[in-house]
Each structure stands twice: as structure tokens, then as C-alpha cells.
Amino acid sequence: MTKASIYGLTFEQLTAWLMERGHKKFRASQVWDWLYRKRVSDFTDMVDVHPECIQALADHYIIQGLQEHLKQESTDGTIKFLLKLQDGNLIETVLMRHKFGLSVCVTTQVGCNIGCSFCASGLLAKSRDLTSGEIVAQIMKVQHHLDQAGQGEKVSHVVVMGIGEPFDNFANMADFIHVIKDHKGLAIGARHITVSTSGLADKIVEFTDSNLQVNLAVSLHAPNNELRTRIMKINRAIPIEKLMQSIDYYLERTNRRITIEYILLKDVNDRREHALELAELLGERRNLANVNLIPYNPVDEHSQYQRSEQESVLAFYDTLKKQGISCSVRLEHGTDIDAACGQLRSKQMNNPSKDSLVVG
């Protein structure tokens, strides 16, 4: 029987688990410190924890559970890890270097069922959700990589934007956030964590009510139902009107800014009239919204889409700004490697003989 990752337990869950087995409450703090501050990879390294407690943990849990299958490193310092889960499935995790710190993009599902017509993640259908421990383990895998480099670097920001729809795995995603936020462990600040959704309106409401206090990004990618349905099939079930109602609920309850993600596809959604329509759609919400314009990374299997010309990107940006919309163009990372989300995994699944380390 496969053991679960200890990383899947929040501090409160770990405390309750140990006390139910007769261990003192303070043992949880000891174990937590060894996991997230000292970052050991074996329970036996927790030298000040009682042997009976160590044995109980080892009988039920593992610490890591992810193996590095492939790694691509870009000239800009971006590293894409292709990681193998205990069941043999592959997922992607990405480390990105910014002026403000080190950011990690994590995956929440094995495959994706949202089916955006331009995205590499959906090329392979979802087979299962990741556990909270498997999501936390991605952060720890990257942090261990940084520790081994010996530069004293630490993961400071997290984006939940990898393979899968995070809100379709809501409970595990929420536990993951509780673990990485905990001030006794990794202590990644709530304002340094962003969760992205393709627009699951009911889950946006649940996210709002959960009071996780992390940032929200919504993948819109089109300013009207006809166009959005064409490129994002989820819009058939959750049209823009319903999505915007849930966004309004979030803005009213939290008074926090929201990011609207908009990937620019040449001659599809990148014309001036699309920018004007987007500005009209945002309306009064513009005071609490920032539009993040995303350059498209072409995917071989979606050859009908191409990257917008730089002139079109600048014109789209300028039109939004003139309409009073806060917007930015996403800084690209890893353009010399398989940059698109899910692209490395898809290539490896389609060509499994390529199992050596890849360095850009």
C-alpha cells in the first residue's frame, strides 16, 4: 500500500494525528520544524523527536515521494522540473527568478479536463487530482534543489497555475495553502500566493468564503461569450455573465484586487475592438482589476494559434490604458525551453524514450 506524504497534513492535522496516538502536543512543533525549517528527507534525521513518534510517522507516511524525471534550465534561470509521482504519473513544476524573489508554479492535477483549445495542459485528459501532500512536495522539491546549491535562497512566491484546474481540486488546494502559509514553517505570505482559475464560478464564491486571503487570478482570454466559447469550452457551462457575478461577489466581500488573465492569440482576440469590449466588460470593476496580457507560447498540436505581433500587443495594451484599465504584459520566462504549461509533460508522454536530463 502506498504511503501518503507527510506534507499533506496541516499543522493542526499533524497535531491531532499525533495526540490521537498518545504523543505530546509539542511533538508536532518539533516535527514541523524538522520538515519545513531544517528540511530533512528522512524521519530518522529528526534526532530530538522520541523514537516511538518517529516510528509512528514512518509507518504511515513518507516525506517526499517525488522523483526528478527530467529538468530543463533556461538561460534566464528558469527551471522546469518534470517530476514522477509514486504511481508513475508525470507532473510539471517551474522555478522562476524575478527581481522580487523566487517564484514556483505548481501543478494540482494529473492532466486537465478544462479543454482550452490553445493550451498544452489539456492535451492529456485528467486522470486524477493531486493530494495536498503532492502539491506541497513540489515546493519542497524545489526548495531542496535551492538548498543543495548552497546560496541560501528560499522560495518566496507561489503561483497555482500549473497543469490542471486548481478549483476542481479545491480541498487539497486549500490544505496546500494552509501548509505553505504557516508561520512556523515555510511562512510564505498570503499576498505572495496566487491561485488561478479558468472560471469555476461556484468555486470562486467558495474561495471567497474560505478566507484564504491569497490572490485570485481568473483566466478570461476573451471579452464575449461567442469568442470565449470558441477557445474555452468551459464557457458553454459557465458563461461570462455568471463568471462576472462570482467576480463581483469576490470583489465586494474582499475588497482585494483581482487579476484578469488574457492570453493574446494572433487575429483571434487581439484586435482593438476586443480591447474596447474588454474595457466595457470590466466597467466599474476596473478599480479593483488588473489585466495581465500574456504572450502566447505556440504549441505544435494547436497550430491554428500563433503569437500576436508585438505591434498588436502594444496596441491592445495602449487601448486598455486609455480606457482607464490597469494592465501589464507578463514578463516571459523560459522561452528557450518548453515554456508552455504542460508542454514538457506532453512531449515526454508522446516520446518516452527521451529520458535524459535536458539543459537549455
Image: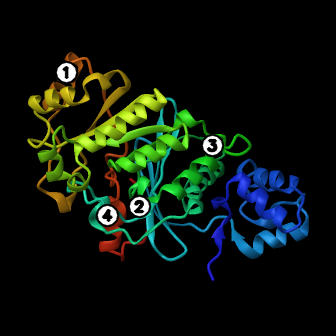
Q: Amino acid at mark 4?
A: Asn
Which of discs 3 and 1 lies nearer the camera? The answer is 3
Q: Earlier in the sequence, mark 3 or mark 4?
A: 4
Residue corresponding to mark 2:
358
Q: Earlier in the sequence, mark 3 or mark 1?
A: 3
In-front residue for pair 244/114: 244
Q: Earlier in the sequence, mark 4 or mark 1?
A: 4
**Residue 357 seen by the camera:** no
From the viewer's perspective, is 161 left or right of 113? right
Q: Residues within 10 Å of mark 4 (few under 14, many from 20)?
A: some
Q: Residues within 10 Å of mark 3 (few under 14, many from 20)?
A: many
Residue 25 point in image, percent of width and height: 86, 55
Residue corresponding to mark 3:
181
- Residue 5: name its quadrant: bottom right
Q: Amino acid at mark 2?
A: Val
Which of discs 1 and 2 lies nearer the camera? The answer is 1
From the viewer's perspective, is 87 left or right of 259? right
Real-space Cα separation, disc 1 to disc 2, in angstroms: 39 Å
* SS at circle 1: helix
Residue corresponding to mark 1:
318
